[in-house]
Amino acid sequence: MATGDSGQLTITLPCSAAMAATEATTPLSTQFCAVGIDSAGRAILIQGNTSPAGVIIGILQNHPNAIDKPAVIQVSGKSKFKAGGALATIGTKLSSTAAGRAIAYATTDCIVGIQLSVAGADGDVIDVLINPMIFID
C-alpha cells in the first residue's frame, strides 16, 4: 500500500458500500481521493465543490474493496491526491469532485489543502498539504 509521507496523522473508518463498489469495479480508483463520513460512520468519496459543500475529512491512503474493510484516511500533513484534471499552479487551494479528485477551489467549496506539485491531466497524482476543517460560507 502506497501512502503519504511517514509520520503523518491517519485515522481508520469502515468503508462504505458505495466506495467499495467503485473500488471493486475499477481497482485503485479510490486511493488518494478525498473522503468524508456518511450517516452510518463509514468513509465515502466526497464532493467538496457543491453547495452546500461536503465535509472533507482527509485523503484515502489505501483502496478498500468491500463494505466495512478499513479505510485508512490521512487527515493532516503532506499526502498524495488524485487530480480531477490539469492543475498547473502550485499553492492553489484544492477542493474535490464527486469522485473525490482534486480540483481548484471556488468560493463555496470545502478546501482539502494546498497544491504542492502539478498535474497534467485527470488521474495524475500530485502532492498536497492537507489542511482540513477550512470551510467557506
Image (cartoon, helix red, strand yellow):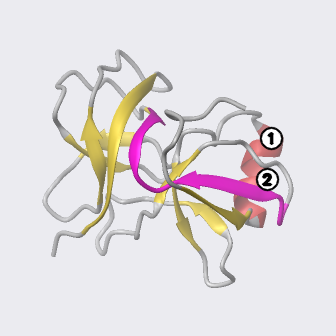
| 96 inside magenta stretch | no
Q: Say which residue label 2 marks.
A: 21
Name the residue rendered at 40%, 19% in the picture: 121
Report which quarter residue 73 is drawn in. bottom right
In front: 78, or 93? 78
Disc 1 on helix, strand or loop? helix
Residue 74 percent coordinates (x, y): 52, 51
Question: Looking at numbered disc 2 in the image, what kind of residue is underneath it?
Answer: Ala
Name the residue rendered at 77%, 34% in the picture: 27
In front: 136, or 18? 136
Disc 2 on helix, strand or loop? helix
Q: Which residues, given as a range, are shown in magenta?
A: 67-81
Name the residue rendered at 71%, 33% in the picture: 28
Name the residue rendered at 62%, 84% in the picture: 39
Report which quarter residue 79 is drawn in. top left
Q: In this view, does 34 lie above or below 6?
A: below
In front: 133, or 108? 133
User: How many residues crowd mark 2 within 10 Å: few (<14), some (14–19), many (20+)?
Assistant: some
Report which quarter residue 102 is drawn in. top left
- The label on residue 25 is 1
Quadrant in which the C terminus is drawn: bottom left
User: Is mark 2 in CB contact (under 8 Å) with mark 1?
Assistant: yes
Question: Looking at numbered disc 1 in the image, what kind of residue is underneath it?
Answer: Thr
User: How many residues crowd mark 1 within 10 Å: few (<14), some (14–19), many (20+)?
Assistant: few
